Image (cartoon, rainbow, N blue to C red):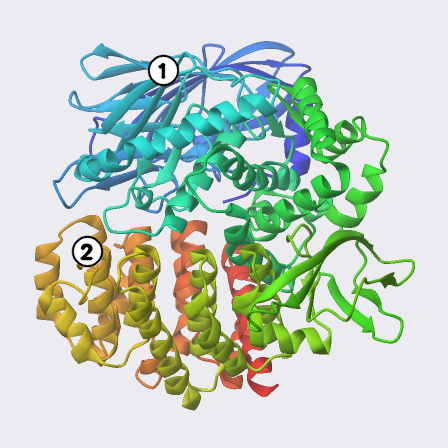
C-alpha cells in the first residue's frame, strides 16, 4: 500500500479547497464490516488529476458530480479523479472492515458482559479505513457525521450528538478540522455528564468499568475543569469546540488522542486496582496534555508531518506545567517528568535513529517516515527544549508569542517558521538562532563542572553545541546532621561560560549542575561532588534536585562511567529514605528492567535480584504503619517481580493479601501469578482458576501473560503460534503474550526462538501492518539475550531492505540498546 508523500500532499493542496464532508456510518451490518457513505464538497482551482484515499472491504459505488466513476479504478487505496476547474461533489459508498489492531474503526467485545464497543483512531493515514477522504492535515474541512447504531447504544462524536430515534444519531457540524481528528465512539457507554463554562462535559467508559469510573469521576472532572480554566487564563483564544467529552476506550494503542470535542484515552486510566498518587498524576497530566491540543494541534494544525513536534512537544510541556499550576492534588509534576519522561528523551537521542526535534522537511518525505518520529524526541526532548526556552525567554514573552500564533492561524495550518516568527515578535532575543541550535540539531550535550580550590572558582565545560541557561546548586553538610545537605546558594549561569565563576565561602560539599532541571543535558560531577552524591543523595533537601542527581547516575551507568552494582548499592542505601514516590518508581524501574535484566552478566543477576529484594523488603517494613500506601504498593510490586521465593508469593495469594496490607486486587493477583509462572511454581489449572475469578479483558491479558511465561516447551510453542501464526490475537492480547514469553530465567528454554523472532516478526508486520509491527518490535523482541551472537544475528536482519518502516525503527532502537548493554557489561 503506497503512503502519501509530502510532494503529493503539496500538489493536492495547490489543486483543492475542501469545504465539507457528510459522513454516514451504519454500524448494524454485522461483526466484520460496517457501511460507510461519504459525500465530499470541494473546489478544484484548476483542471487537473488527483486522488482520494479509501481502503474498503467492498467499494460499491462512486459518483463525481452525479456521474459514475468505475470502482475498479481503485488501486492501492487510491481512487483517481480527473477534475475540471470549479465546484465538485464526490460520493463514495463502501463497506469497511472493523479492526482488532487499534487502527481505523476498532471493534471490541467485553468478555465481562458480552457488550460490544467501537471507536475510531484515524491518526496519520487511518481515516481511509473508515471513510473516503483527501487525507492530509492541511486540507481542513467541516465534518457532518451521522451514525446508525444498535438502539441501546450511545454514539459520541466531535460535536454534540442527537439521537433521532431508531438508533440514528446526528453529530453537530465541526469547525474546520483535519481529517485525522474526526472521531466516533459507539456502544452502550456508561456516561457521567456535567456542564462547565456553559459547555457540556462528559466522561465515558465500558459498562463493566462503571463502578471504577464512578469512584474517580469527581477527581477526573475536577482536573478537567481546573485545566480548562487555567488554559483560558493563559490563552486569548477561547476553547473552539461545542463540547468536551473524554471517552476511556479499550485496546487503545496510544495513551490518548486529541480528537477535538471527543478525546479518547486508553481505559487502563479507569483504575480497577489500587494505584499510586504518581499514577493518578500521570492520568491528570494526560488530561492536560490532550486539552492543550485543542489549541495547539486542533485549532492550529501542522501543515505537514515534519512539524509533529509542534503538536506533541507543546502539549507535553503544557501538560506538566498546567497540572503543576492548576491543582494542588499532586506533588511537583516536574520531578516525574525528570525521572520518567526526560529519560525517554535522553535514551532516544543517543540512538542511531535520533533526529532533530524539528527535522528538515526532506527528512520526512512521506507518512511512513513521519510515523517514526512519535518518540521520546518529539515528546520529551521537545518539551525539555520548550522548558529551556521559557527559562531563557521568559514566560510572559513565550505566552505572548503563542497567543499571536493562535490568532494568526486559527482554524488553519502553520509551520515551524510561522511558530518561530510569532515567538520572535514578542521579544528582542534572537529566537531564530536559538531554534536553529536547539531544534535543528541532534544529540545530548554533557555539562561537567571543575572546581579550582586555589582560586575558589567554578568552570562548566560543555560537550556539545547548544547554549544553556542553568542553575547551579551549591550544597554544604548540615552541621547538626552530617548526612543531610543544606542549600548554600544557587547561581544562574549561561553555558558556555566566558570566565570562571567565583564561589562564595569554602568548597561546597556538592555542586549540582542544572539544579531545577530547566535544561536538556546530561550532567556530571567533579570528583569530590560525585563521592558526596553517592554518599549523601537522600540528604539533598529538594526532590527535583535529587531527581537530577539520580538521572546523572543513570546516565553514568549507561555510558560505562559508573558500575551497575554501584547504582544498585546507592539505591539500597538511599531509597529507604526517599520521600518522593516518582523517584522511587523511576530508580526501581531502571534498576530492575535495565541493570538486573540486562546490564549485569547472567551469573551476577541472582545477586542483583537479591539486592532488589532486600531493598523492597526494607521499603515494605518502612511502610508498616500505613502512612504511605503508595510507597508500600510500589515496594510490593517490585518485590513480587524480583523475588525468587515462590512460597512467600503463594502464601500471599492464598491469604488474599500481604501481611499488613495491601489486600490483593486483580492487578496484584495477576502479577503474583505471572512471577510464579516464571519460577515454575504454578500451572495451567491455577491460571484457569484465576481467569474464572477475573474474566475481564484485563484478566484475559493476565492469563495470556501467565501462560506464555510457563517454563515448558509446550507453553512456549503455543504462545509463539498465537503471536506469529494465527493472527487471532488483538493488539493487547499480543502484547500480553509477548510480555510473558521472554524471561531471563528461561534463557536456555527459549534460545531457539531468538533466531526465529526476526523472520517471524517481519512476516507479521507485513500481514498485520504498522501497529502490530511496532508491538512486535517493542514487546516481542528478545531483549534478555545480551550476547554477541544475538547482536550479529540482529544486525544481519536489520540490513534487509524488506522491513516495514515501523518494524525497522523498533529493531534499530532495540539493537542499539543491545550494543549498549554489551558495552556496559565490558566496562
The crowding category of the residue bearing disc 2, from other C-alpha atoms within 10 Å (few below 14, some 14 to 19, many at least 20), is some
Secondary structure of the residue carrying tag 1 is loop
Location of mark 2 (residue): 666
Rendered residue at 54%/61% (across/down) = 808
Picture quadrant where residue 466 is located? bottom right
Task: Give the side of residue 646 with respect to residue 278, left or right.
Answer: left
The crowding category of the residue bearing disc 1, from other C-alpha atoms within 10 Å (few below 14, some 14 to 19, many at least 20), is many
**Gap in angstroms between the C-alphas marked 2 and 1:** 36 Å
Location of mark 1 (residue): 160
Rendered residue at 29%/63% (across/down) = 737
Closest to the observer: 323 or 805? 323
Number of numbered discs: 2
Q: Is residue 428 above or below residue 235?
A: below
Task: Give the side of residue 245 with respect to residue 326, left or right.
Answer: left
> Which residue reaches farthest right?
499
Closest to the observer: 581 or 258? 581
Q: Position of residue 448 (x, y in %)?
A: 75, 68
Q: Quadrant of the C terminus?
A: bottom right
Labels 2 & 1 near each other (Cβ < 8 A): no
> Which residue reaches farthest front?
480
Q: Which of label 2 and label 1 is nearer to you?
A: 2
Q: Earlier in the sequence, mark 2 or mark 1?
A: 1
Q: Is residue 368 above or below residue 159?
A: below
Rendered residue at 33%/58% (across/down) = 735
Closest to the observer: 371 or 681? 681
Picture quadrant where residue 558 is located? bottom right
Task: Give the side of residue 643 with respect to residue 338, left or right.
Answer: left
Closest to the observer: 39 or 329? 329
Q: Is residue 581 above or below residue 418?
A: below
Amino acid at each position: 500500500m503506497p503512503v502519501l508523500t509530502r510532494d503529493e500532499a503539496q500538489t493536492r493542496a495547490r489543486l483543492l479547497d475542501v469545504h465539507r464532508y457528510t459522513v454516514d456510518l451504519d454500524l448494524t451490518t454485522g461483526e466484520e464490516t460496517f457501511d460507510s457513505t461519504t459525500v465530499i464538497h470541494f473546489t478544484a482551482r484548476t483542471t487537473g488529476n488527483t486522488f482520494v484515499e479509501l481502503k474498503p472491504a467492498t467499494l460499491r459505488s462512486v459518483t463525481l458530480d452525479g456521474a459514475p466513476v468505475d470502482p475498479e479504478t481503485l488501486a492501492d487505496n487510491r481512487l483517481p479523479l480527473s477534475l475540471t476547474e470549479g465546484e465538485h461533489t464526490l460520493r463514495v459508498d463502501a463497506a469497511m472492515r472493523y479492526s482488532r489492531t487499534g487502527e481505523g474503526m476498532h471493534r471490541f467485545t467485553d468478555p465481562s458482559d458480552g457488550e460490544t464497543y467501537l471507536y475510531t483512531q484515524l491518526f496519520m493515514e487511518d481515516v481511509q479505513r473508515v471513510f473516503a477522504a483527501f487525507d492530509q492535515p492541511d486540507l481542513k474541512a467541516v465534518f457532518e457525521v451521522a451514525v446508525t447504531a444498535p438502539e441501546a447504544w450511545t454514539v459520541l462524536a466531535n460535536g454534540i450528538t442527537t439521537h433521532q430515534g431508531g438508533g440514528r444519531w446526528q453529530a453537530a457540524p465541526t469547525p474546520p478540522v483535519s481529517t485525522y481528528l474526526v472521531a466516533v465512539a459507539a456502544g452502550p457507554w456508561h456516561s457521567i455528564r456535567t456542564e462547565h463554562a456553559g459547555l457540556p462535559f462528559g466522561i465515558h467508559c465500558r459498562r463493566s468499568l462503571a463502578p471504577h469510573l464512578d469512584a474517580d469521576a469527581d477527581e477526573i472532572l475536577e482536573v478537567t475543569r481546573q485545566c480548562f480554566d487555567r488554559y483560558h487564563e493563559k490563552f486569548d483564544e477561547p476553547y473552539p469546540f461545542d463540547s468536551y467529552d473524554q471517552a476511556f476506550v479499550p485496546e487503545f494503542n496510544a495513551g490518548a488522542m486529541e480528537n477535538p470535542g471527543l478525546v479518547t484515552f486508553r481505559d487502563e486510566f479507569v483504575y480497577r486496582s489500587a494505584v499510586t498518587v504518581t499514577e493518578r498524576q500521570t492520568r491528570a497530566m494526560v488530561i492536560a496534555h490532550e486539552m492543550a491540543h485543542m489549541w495547539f494541534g486542533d485549532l492550529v494544525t501542522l501543515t505537514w508531518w515534519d512539524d509533529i513536534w509542534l503538536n506533541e512537544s507543546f502539549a507535553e510541556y503544557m501538560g506538566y506545567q498546567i497540572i503543576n499550576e492548576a491543582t494542588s492534588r499532586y506533588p511537583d509534576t516536574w520531578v516525574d517528568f525528570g525521572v520518567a519522561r526526560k529519560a525517554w528523551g535522553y535514551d532516544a537521542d543517543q540512538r542511531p535513529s535520533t533526529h532533530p526535534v524539528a527535522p528538515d522537511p526532506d527528512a520526512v518525505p512521506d507518512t511512513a517516515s513521519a510515523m517514526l518520529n512519535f518518540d521520546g524526541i518529539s515528546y520529551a526532548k521537545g518539551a525539555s527544549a520548550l522548558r529551556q526556552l521559557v527559562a531563557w525567554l521568559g514566560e510572559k514573552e513565550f505566552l505572548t508569542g503563542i497567543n499571536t500564533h493562535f490568532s494568526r492561524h486559527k482554524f488553519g495550518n502553520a509551520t515551524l517558521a510561522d511558530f518561530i516568527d510569532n515567538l520572535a515578535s514578542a521579544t528582542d532575543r534572537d529566537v531564530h538562532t536559538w531554534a536553529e541550535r536547539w531544534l535543528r540539531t541532534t544529540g545530548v550535550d554533557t555539562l561537567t563542572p571543575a572546581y579550582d580550590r586555589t582560586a575558589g572558582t567554578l568552570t562548566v565545560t560543555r560537550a556539545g553545541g547548544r547554549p544553556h541557561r542553568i542553575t547551579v546548586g551549591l550544597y554544604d553538610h548540615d552541621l547538626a546532621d552530617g548526612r543531610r545537605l543544606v542549600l548554600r546558594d544557587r547561581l544562574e549561569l549561561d553555558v558556555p561560560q566566558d570566565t570562571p565563576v567565583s564561589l562564595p565561602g569554602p568548597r561546597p560539599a556538592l555542586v549540582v549542575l542544572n539544579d531545577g532541571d530547566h535544561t536538556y543535558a546530561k550532567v556530571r560531577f567533579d570528583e569530590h561532588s560525585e563521592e558526596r552524591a553517592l554518599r549523601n543523595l537522600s540528604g539533598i533537601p529538594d526532590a527535583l534536585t535529587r531527581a537530577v542527581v539520580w538521572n546523572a547516575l543513570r546516565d553514568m551507568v549507561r555510558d560505562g562511567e559508573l558500575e551497575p552494582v554501584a547504582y544498585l548499592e546507592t539505591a539500597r542505601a538511599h531509597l529507604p529514605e526517599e520521600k518522593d514516590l516518582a523517584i522511587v518508581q523511576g530508580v526501581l524501574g531502571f534498576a530492575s528492567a535495565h541493570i538486573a535484566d540486562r546490564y549485569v552478566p547472567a551469573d551476577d543477576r541472582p545477586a542483583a535480584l537479591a539486592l532488589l529484594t532486600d531493598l523492597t523488603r526494607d521499603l515494605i517494613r518502612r511502610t508498616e504503619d500505613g502512612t504511605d500506601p503508595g510507597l508500600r504498593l510500589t515496594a510490593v510490586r517490585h518485590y513480587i517481580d524480583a523475588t525468587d521465593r515462590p512460597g512467600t508469593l503463594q502464601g500471599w495469594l492464598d491469604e488474599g493479601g500481604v501481611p499488613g496490607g495491601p489486600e490483593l486486587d486483580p492487578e496484584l493477583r495477576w502479577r503474583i501469578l505471572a512471577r510464579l509462572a516464571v519460577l515454575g511454581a504454578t500451572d495451567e489449572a491455577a491460571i484457569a482458576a484465576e481467569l474464572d475469578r477475573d474474566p475481564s479483558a484485563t484478566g484475559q491479558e493476565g492469563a495470556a501473560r501467565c501462560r506464555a511465561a510457563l517454563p515448558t516447551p509446550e507453553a512456549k510453542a503455543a504462545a509463539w503460534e498465537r503471536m506469529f501464526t494465527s493472527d487471532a490475537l488483538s493488539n493487547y492480547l499480543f502484547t500480553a503474550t509477548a510480555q510473558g514469553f521472554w524471561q531471563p530465567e528461561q534463557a536456555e528454554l527459549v534460545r531457539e526462538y531468538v533466531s526465529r523472532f526476526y523472520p517471524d516478526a517481519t512476516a507479521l508486520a507485513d500481514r498485520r501492518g504498522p501497529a502490530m509491527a511496532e508491538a512486535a518490535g517493542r514487546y516481542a523482541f528478545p531483549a534478555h539475550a545480551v550476547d554477541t551472537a544475538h547482536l550479529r544475528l540482529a544486525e544481519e536482519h536489520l540490513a534487509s531492505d524488506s522491513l516495514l518502516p515501523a518494524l525497522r525503527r523498533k529493531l534499530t532502537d532495540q539493537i542499539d540498546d543491545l550494543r549498549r548493554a554489551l558495552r556496559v557489561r565490558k566496562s
